[in-house]
Image: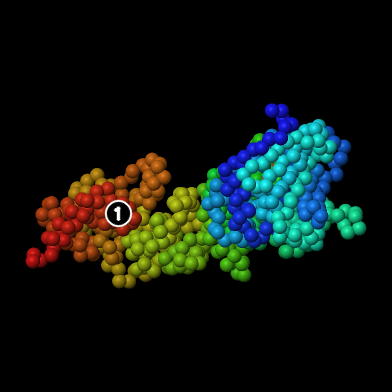
Amino acid sequence: MTAAEKQTMGFQTEVRQLLNLMIHSLYSEKEIFLRELISNASDAADKLRFEALKNDSLYEGDSAISLRVDVDREARTLTVSDNGIGMSRDEVIHNIGTIAHSGTKRFFERLTGDEARDARLIGQFGVGFYSAFMVADRVTLQTRRAGAPADEGVMWESTGEGEYTVENVHRPERGTIVTLHLREGEDEFLDAWRVRSIIHKYSDHIAWPILMRKEDGGDETVNKASALWARPRNEITELEYDEFYKQTTHDYEAPLAHIHSRVEGKQEYIALLYVPRHAPFDLYDRERRYGIKLYVRRVFIMDDAEQLMPAYLRFVRGVIDAADLPLNVSREILQSSRDIDAIRAGATRRVLDLLAELADSETEKDKYQEFWGEFGTVLKEGVIEDQANRERLAKLMRWSSTRSDEPKISLAEYVARMAPGQNQIYYLTAESLGAARNSPHLEVFRSRGIEVLLLTDRIDEWVMTHLTEFDGKPLRSVAKGDLDLKGVGNEAGEAVTPPEAPEMKELTARMARALGERVKEVRVSTRLTDSPACLVAGEHDLGMHLERLLKAAGQKAPGTKPILEVNPHHPLIRRLAAEAEGRRFEDWSQLLFDQALLAEGGTLEDGAGYVRRLNELLLALSPAS
Ligand code: ADP
Ligand code: MG
């Protein structure tokens, strides 16, 4: 078969599924098909301008780029065309017949059955072209790649039912024209006024002119067709900022906040950056794309320029337009460019300042809590990764505490209400808020009225290994090391037994012998008021919770042994001190250790042994019947 022949080919399975969904399940907001086709046409125009930087013969003598939308009532067609980069036959087969990125599977996973929501998802998943089949029962695409001979034009056609055809056609014009043969009942898209209003709604900020035919036959540009970010701030309304965001990100919600700054000096650039209201579905996906578009002097260079934002700000969307970069900058160049490093550092600062502004403002506080709920976990990565901004980031952190689940509090708020005599910031890490609240480690803090931060995100453990102090106050785990609370908070009612009391010395020594390898040490606790015992980690050990996390993640944990602390005032401990029988003493000790392990969310290595010992002791305690 020669390349020119007509070929009938089957869509990839995922494409079939997707088409099926478009045609049979999505009925609301069908109008977004136009946004998708215009966005593709605009991308094609961007690509042509970019490639022509190196090879201006691609313009074929015509460098005026524009997009067109036309309706033909007689033929019942709507067409979207561009004189952009176009596609070769292979590219058509690859780009239109298959879905290249792994987004589709995740797209299907996210579908809710709520049509309005699902329709909105379409654009976000990069499967936009197929949305044409929501309103068309036949779609024809004719294209020719810029620079290719006229007989390498390609015609693609499909009814959206599993197969498509491709054949070569003669096509003098470069670029692409997509023709939609509208389904019955979709006549609204033949109405030029209606089409115009859809373009205003979704595509006003496309930087290329979108032309439509006027009543009297001439052409007119129906969109604004200018780069919003290049306009002065005071000439842009909030609504325009929001619309620009929605149109470029395909998000249906307005953003939470934005910054627009023109930076002069060593590196000159304009940044228009947005914080979305909601986290994208793939925020934690390693393959996830970044949200910054790079322009150089208004020329689009690339999407997802990951060098322009640190990983922990990957949710930020928007545009950076650099004045001094070479137009032929590539991803490889970006990776090792000092200029880019400087732009990233500046843009990062600006985003952090914006967040700080939200966080500190009395009126925007709720917004910040909302932000934190969506992106807090990601922002925490910054404390670990971005040493230069660590202090700034520390101020942005929010955690629950023994005094407040919601709203979560800042370290500054914590410090401002520290107990008398307190000069450290106390925290506890745990699997969940419930587990944290019931932890025996909190007992003494509760009785002394000292607030403790409750950290329940997996990443918190790592954050704490990097955040050692705030405002000159060390951060301290309540489950680690020796605790000296002398003179801190309210001491009334707390009987203090000196750890060196002889009967306690003897008890802890016997317990240490009984527990052998399971513990590093047994000692008298200053942490406990109600529980008989708890486990703590050495001052410089990883901590039990982190060890468990590491193991759960399949990583090697150092396997540090815990310290068992006992409460000298607890009746069980007092009884144990009086226990003379060796076997019974050992069982008690093991039980106390296992209980302490369970209480902090650990799992027993020998659950059956625990049950046996517990039952034996229960039997020994209860009066024989
Ligand atoms: P996305 O735009 O997210 O890649 P689409 O389904 O909208 O997904 O388009 C798929 C691909 O088809 C595009 O990436 C592009 O390569 C190609 N394509 C679509 N429309 C055009 C066009 N007008 N000109 C050139 N290529 C196009
Ligand atoms: Mg697209």
Q: Can residue 64 be seen in the rendering of this structure?
A: yes
Residue at numbered disc 1: 597
* Quarter containing the C terminus: bottom left
* Quarter containing the N terminus: top right
Q: Secondary structure at mark 1?
A: helix
Which of these two is toward me, 527 or 229? 229
Q: Residue at x 40, y 56 (%)?
A: 431
Marks counted in the figure total 1
Which of these two is toward me, 559 or 303? 303
- Scheme of image coloration: rainbow
> Residue 23: x and y, percent?
63, 53
In this image, 61 relative to 87: left or right? right
> Residue 592: x and y, percent?
23, 56
- Tell me if mark 1 has few (under 14), some (14-19) or many (20+) residues whose alpha carbon lies within 10 angstroms of its own: many
Q: Residue at x 62, y 70 (%)?
A: 363
Q: Can residue 52 be seen in the rendering of this structure?
A: no
Name above or below for residue 385 compared with residue 398. Answer: above
Q: Residue at x 67, y 58 (%)?
A: 30
In this image, 420 relative to 94: left or right? left
- Under mark 1, the amino acid is Leu
> Residue 509: x and y, percent?
20, 51
